[in-house]
Amino acid sequence: MTKKTSNRFSPEVRQRAVRMVLDHGGDHASQWSAIGSIAAKIGCTAETLRKWVRQAERDQGLRAGPTTAEQERIKTLERENRELRQANEILRKASAYFAAAELDRRSKP
């Protein structure tokens, strides 16, 4: 699974947009209408801003799911796991190679 990430918007712009949605949600008929209105003002899609808002809600404990810190930790652990699997595969192949070489050496007079 590859995810396209864009750093088109600075963390400050993201935080300000999320804060605007959370602070001015009552001024709109729904949170989605607030998101649509604010997204148009900052130049991102409503879906992008919705994702930022949902992540901010998880980070603040207002919504279930992994926080940003937990997601980063999971990503780090998955990368380490992948690297360890690769290292183990290399060691397994090297072990088999040297075992075969040792058997070959012993069988020759």
Image (cartoon, grey):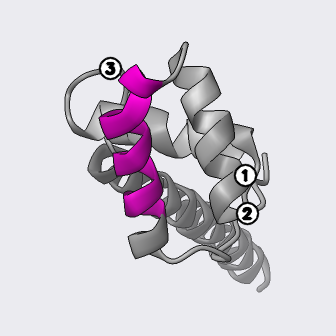
Label 3 sits on a secondary structure element that is loop
Which residue sits at x=68%, y=77%?
A: 8
**In the image, residue 32 above or below residue 82:** above
Label 2 sits on a secondary structure element that is loop
**In the image, residue 1 above or below residue 75:** above
> Looking at this view, is 106 or 68 the one in front?
68
Q: Which residue is mark 1?
A: 40
> Looking at this view, is 17 or 79 the one in front?
17
Quadrant occupied by the N terminus: top right
Quadrant occupied by the C terminus: bottom right
Q: Position of residue 82 (x, y in %)?
A: 57, 58
Amino acid bearing label 1? Ala
Relative placement, left or right, of 81 versus 49 is left
Q: Which residue is mark 3?
A: 63
Q: Position of residue 104 (x, y in %)?
A: 77, 76
Mark 2 neighbour density, 10 Å: few (under 14) some (14–19) many (20 or more): few
Tell me the magenta residue range.
14-27
Relative placement, left or right, of 74 versus 109 is left
Relative placement, left or right, of 63 versus 18 is left
